[in-house]
Amino acid sequence: STRKAVWLKGCSFIGDNVTGRSQETQAAIENLLEYIKDGLPEGVHLLLTAYEVDRRRSFYKTLTKIALVEEYNKPDISKDGWQGDVAKLVRDAAKKRGLTFEASALDLFVNRVSESSKQIMNELDKLDLYLGQERRSVTADDVTVMVPLTRTGVILELGRAIEQGGAARSLYPIERQ
């Protein structure tokens, strides 16, 4: 049997934007949804990716009921609690490498790399090589030595230092820049 994948890549038409709101787009989306509901031909798989999705629309709501929908959203660092989302991502990725983080090291790592998943993976690879096979627990000192501050990380580290009452310590991130 022949298997095929149809990939609708970067679908801007399902977001809350000018294109997504147009009547022509809405009609086309409804046609696509009917086609999907009727069932794809044997051996055909549809993959749809988008950077922006309007979850209020019937297309999205129906799709979640009839298909496997997975979301990979970047944490929003402008909202409270983002550190927990990033920390979970870091812990899961570290576990796959056989690494564990001390609590203070994880906090420091998250604030240094911010929400960039690509940078998180790169920095975990560096820590993995740095620690070698002998030691698998990441300390705050390891993070300080191996993980550079991003622009966002400088701001977060500065805020952390001030929050912890260390005015002198708050100069360290500034001096490093």
Image: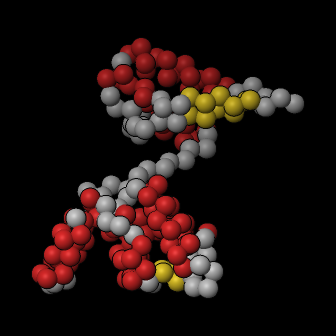
Q: Is residue 11 above or below residue 145?
A: above
Say which of 145 and 26 sits in front: 145
Find residue 80 and report its horizontal and vertical position in percent: 27, 64
Residue that lies at the very extreme toward the right in this rendered image: 1
Q: In this rendering, is residue 27 above or below 61? A: above
Taking depth in this image into account, of 140 and 47 the one nearest to the observer is: 140
Q: Quadrant of residue 116?
A: bottom left
Residue drawn at the location 15% of the way across and 75% of the way down: 171
Question: Which residue sits at x=18%, y=81%?
Answer: 169
State the image coordinates of residue 76 (x, y, percent, origin top left): 33, 55
- Position above or below: 48 against 102: above
Q: Quadrant of the C terminus?
A: bottom left
Q: Position of residue 100 (x, y in %)?
A: 53, 79
Q: Position of residue 56 (x, y in %)?
A: 39, 38
Q: Which of the 4 image quarters holds residue 39?
A: top right
Of all residues, the one furthest to the top in this rendering is 24
Work out whether residue 143 can be spotted. Answer: yes
Task: Report the residue at 74% width, 29% height from top.
Answer: 4
